[in-house]
Image: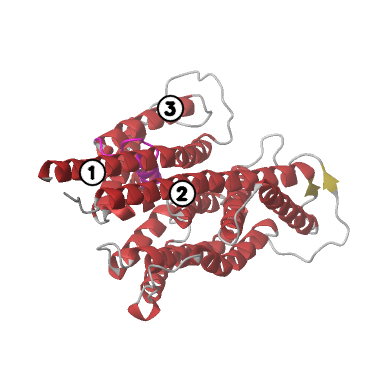
Amino acid sequence: MARQLRRSRASVFSIGKRRRRVEQQKSHKLGFALLGYMAVVTLILTWAPFRFAIPNEVNLDFKIHLYDVVSNIFLFVPLGFLLQLSLKDPQRSPAKTALVAGALLSTIIEIGQFFLEGRYSSPIDIMTNSTGAWLGGLVYTRIRLQMTERRVGILALNLPLTSLFYLLTPLFWLTGFTGGDESARIITIPILALIGSIILAAVYNYRLRHSTTITPIMVARAAVIWFYIATVTVFMEAPFLIILTGIFVGILVLAQTDNRFARRAEERRFEALTLRRVLPLFTLYMFLQVFWPFQAPDPIWDMTWDLDGLSDNPPLSEIFRFLEYLAAFTLFGYMISEFAGRLVDISMKGMLWIFAFVFSFAAELEFIRGLHPDYPLSVVHFIMGGAAGTFGAIIYFLQLKAIRVVLVSRRKAAAKSHIVNQPVRS
């Protein structure tokens, strides 16, 4: 009987180990998609406006600029963190793996800048970027140690709302890079910060409060660090605004995670409740984005088929503004899919309705943009916005599939464990 009991316990341990391996393998695809998205945004930020040419001489920059060093480190921290989510086995030297991957991506960037007119390749950038990726791997390890085995899945993207942080980060970057005559558009930063704080507080209240050793102070501190990393491209333009907004984010998260606002861990469908608060704010942000700078609407608007302002050597501010528009629609498509998916089970017909809703919203925003006296209505602008929103919806559906696999595997494991733990009759 004792031997049979030992075999049963070993079987339960083997089942749990296989279940965790299956969950990680299913969720790593989504992590890889988000990592690829972040890496592409990073390449665009460093290679724009893509005027490649054969250089006449080799130019290497060995000067150390404090702001560039800090920016390069912070820009690669999310990449190092996301890399761990895209690996099938993230426990194998996460920091070392992130360091090597960061060095590889940074080397590709610097080689590309060698062929860009007016740019200089810098070995210092490779070192600082690699350091940022390495720190991202360390952050992943530190957070993972603070969670129970059951809640490690949150890092592995098994909780949908956490993906919004990964999609918000490049949006912050692009908002900071708009620059030029439209640098005042960074007033939209507090709106994005408010959205992030609401989401993080909800995740903690509903899923982390009763299942980990993480405290509200730790959550508020993490929120402030995340905000400063996400806004590193904006800091030099408005340091006072960024510092104050970061403090505001910490206070807001701490207030929302106070015991008086605690939520039950068993509460379901909290994602839809949270998104009801977030979506109006994000809609306001997108309206500010497409109708800036504010002027009296022009009742007569023109229409064009191409991307107005992006032909024949466009300024960097126009390129980054368009990329910000696409990043915003990616986040919007994800939010709408998340909101619908938390209310009803999404079928193929429901997916088509989501895609139609995303494109209709893109059409409405484009119509509003066409009322601006400086912008014509652009058909290509509308199509690419809808396509970006569709990509955001696809990210959610990938995540939904991973979550369903996790739930099924856990139910099967629980059922087998219950059977195995039944008392053995002689």
Verify CB contact (< 8 Å) between mark 3 and mark 1.
Answer: no
Q: Position of residue 345 (x, y in %)?
A: 60, 55
- Which residue is label 2 attached to? 403
Q: Nearer the viewer, residue 298 or 140?
A: 140
In the figure, residue 299 lies in which quadrant? bottom right
Q: Secondary structure at mark 2?
A: helix
Above or below, comparing residue 401 to residue 275 in the picture:
above
Kindly identify the residue that appears in the image at 75 percent across and 54 percent down: 360
Image: magenta residue range: 74-92
Left or right relative to 312: residue 80: left
The residue at the far front in this view is: 426
Above or below, comparing residue 332 to residue 64 in the picture:
below
In the figure, residue 394 lies in which quadrant? top right
Q: Nearer the viewer, residue 346 or 146?
A: 346
In the figure, residue 23 lies in which quadrant? top left
Kindly identify the residue that appears in the image at 30 percent across and 63 percent down: 211
Q: Position of residue 386 (x, y in %)?
A: 69, 47
The type of residue carrying mark 3 is Ile
Q: Is residue 297 visible?
A: yes
N-term-proximal mark, 3 vs 1:
1
- Which residue is label 3 attached to? 108
- Which residue is label 1 attached to? 13
The type of residue carrying mark 1 is Phe
